[in-house]
């Protein structure tokens, strides 16, 4: 299992320090939520922040683009330090172009779908991407409740793609439900509010145990 703590829930005033704490506690990936106020109602942060934190850690930068027309910015996010770039199927008319742009730069391509989007909408990309990111909340905000009905999608993808395929699940995952999400077939777990609280080290260790 890979834990990918989402910095959306971190204290941005001491961001590098909080990232190091998560890393030292055993987290290997860092989930970076980019929001444009268009694909999702909220706005978060973008390239300058990624470029800044890139200097402080060698963690795998798992960049989750919640932006419209991601193909306009994919190269910029890779220049800023992304190791993997995940875009939403609902956000682009050119998913193949997105995958190719990411792969051409030697980075890992991920495709994501919202809770309401059927898995059949991304099925044609399973063999082309390195990872599927199943959203288990409506994208846009941290701290929401896990939507149980997405479990069916996780099971379907795991069943179809086999044990080695990367399935990341994002939203509403805590120490209380992480085991059940893993049991459904996820192998990469995003956690924001469940990591970046008063006890980052204890939270990371608790989720990884
Ligand atoms: C939601 C983001 C998530 C979010 C998860 O739009 O994609 O990555 O930060 O936050 P929690 O773990 O608090 O649900
Ligand atoms: Zn995310």
Image (cartoon, rainbow, N blue to C red):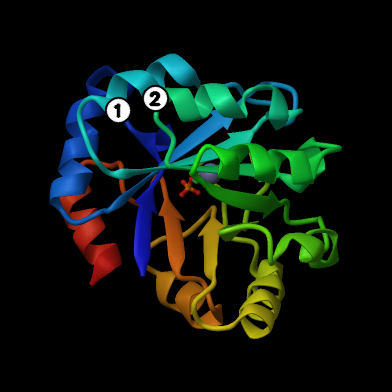
Q: Position of residue 112 (x, y in %)?
A: 67, 51
- Label 2 with label 1: CB-CB less than 8 Å: yes
Q: Is residue 13 left or right of residue 125?
A: left
Q: Is residue 151 visible?
A: yes
Q: Nearer the viewer, residue 62 or 26?
A: 62
User: In the image, what residue occupies the spot 52% across and 66% down?
Assistant: 166
**Rendered view: 126 above or below 12:** below
Q: Nearer the viewer, residue 51 or 31?
A: 51
Q: Is residue 40 visible?
A: no
Q: Position of residue 125 (x, y in %)?
A: 74, 60
Q: State the separation of the CA atoms marked 2 and 1.
A: 6 Å
Indicate the quadrant containing the N terminus: top left, top right, bottom left or bottom right.
bottom left
User: In the image, what residue occupies the spot 70% across and 65% down?
Assistant: 126
**Rendered view: 156 above or below 136:** below
Q: Position of residue 119 (x, y in %)?
A: 78, 65
Q: Secondary structure at mark 2?
A: helix
Residue 50: which disc? 2
Snapshot quadrant of residue 192:
top left
Snapshot quadrant of residue 121:
bottom right
Q: Residues within 10 Å of mark 1 (few under 14, many from 20)?
A: some
> Which residue corresponds to mark 1?
54
Indicate the quadrant containing the C terminus: top left, top right, bottom left or bottom right.
bottom left
Kindly give the residue lying farthest to the front in the view shown. 104
Q: Is residue 64 left or right of residue 128?
A: left
User: In the image, what residue occupies the spot 16% across and 51% down?
Assistant: 201
Q: Residues within 10 Å of mark 2 (few under 14, many from 20)?
A: many
């Amino acid at each position: 299992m890979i834990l990918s703590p989402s910095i959306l829930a971190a204290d941005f005033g001491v961001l590098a320090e909080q990232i190091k704490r998560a890393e030292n506690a055993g987290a290997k990936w860092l989930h970076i939520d980019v929001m444009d106020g268009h694909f999702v109602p909220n706005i978060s942060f973008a390239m300058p922040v990624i470029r800044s934190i890139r200097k402080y850690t060698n963690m795998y930068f798992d960049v989750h683009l919640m932006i419209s027309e991601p193909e306009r910015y994919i190269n910029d996010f890779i220049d800023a330090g992304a190791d993997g770039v995940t875009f939403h199927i609902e956000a682009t008319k050119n998913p193949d172009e997105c995958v190719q742009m990411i792969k051409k730069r030697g980075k890992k391509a991920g495709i994501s779908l919202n809770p309401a989007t059927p898995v059949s909408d991304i099925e044609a990309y399973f063999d082309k991407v390195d990872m599927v990111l199943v959203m288990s909340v409506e994208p846009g905000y941290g701290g929401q409740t896990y939507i149980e009905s997405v479990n069916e999608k996780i099971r379907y993808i795991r069943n179809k793609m086999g044990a080695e395929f990367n399935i990341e699940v994002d939203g509403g995952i805590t120490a209380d439900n992480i085991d059940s999400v893993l049991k459904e077939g996820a192998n990469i777990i995003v956690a924001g509010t469940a990591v970046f609280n008063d006890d980052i080290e204890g939270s990371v260790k608790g989720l990884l145990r």
